[in-house]
Image (cartoon, rainbow, N blue to C red):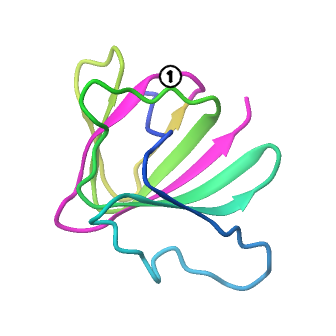
Amino acid sequence: MPACGYSGRRGLYLRQPHKDTKIQNLFHPVPDARAGEVIETLLEDDHCRIERIVSEGQATPPGEWFDQETDEWVVLLQGSAGLLCEGEPEIAVMRPGDYVYIPAHRRHRVEWTDSTQKTVWLAVHIQP
């Protein structure tokens, strides 16, 4: 798998960080993402941000690349997606359990996400 991934995504951002000790579940409830990707910040401080991202058929618009300011580690928990890094010869298919580290400013794009089910990602953004 190439050393890249996705971030800088467009979608609905839910900034409701959970700062208590209440047990939460990444899969319940999973928001409807058919109208647009849903990005929920689960935890954030000055050096790190953890997000749950729910996609359902979304992709990076043609000709656009993500070029983020932070390092990112992302794991695909449910569904599937196709990831392309600039300079890589082919799209990497991600399935549940697959993860990737993306250094800051590594240009990349999501070519597709599963349109038949929700794709759930967990993304950890780290200040370099």
Residue 1 visible? The answer is no
Residue 75 horizontal/vertical position (percent): 47, 52
76 lies above or below 33 = above
Single out the residue that lies furthest toward the top.
Answer: 87
Q: Which residue is mark 1?
A: 106
Residue at the (35%, 33%) spot, across then down? 109
Q: Left of 23 or right of it: where is 96?
A: left
As helix, strand or loop, the secondary structure at mark 1 comes to loop
Quadrant of the rendered structure where residue 85 is?
Answer: top left
* In front of the other: 95 or 26: 26
The N terminus lies in which quarter of the figure? top left
Give the x, y percent position of residue 42. Answer: 65, 65
The location of residue 86, given as percent across then percent down, is 36, 19
Quarter in which the C terminus is drawn: top right
Q: State yes or no: residue 127 in magenta.
A: yes
| Residue at horizontal 73 percent and vertical 35 percent from the top | 127
- Return the residue found at the far right: 46
Relative placement, left or right, of 89 versus 23 is: left
Three-letter amino acid code at the position of disc 1: Arg
Which contiguous range is marked in magenta? 103-128
| Figure quadrant of residue 21 | bottom right
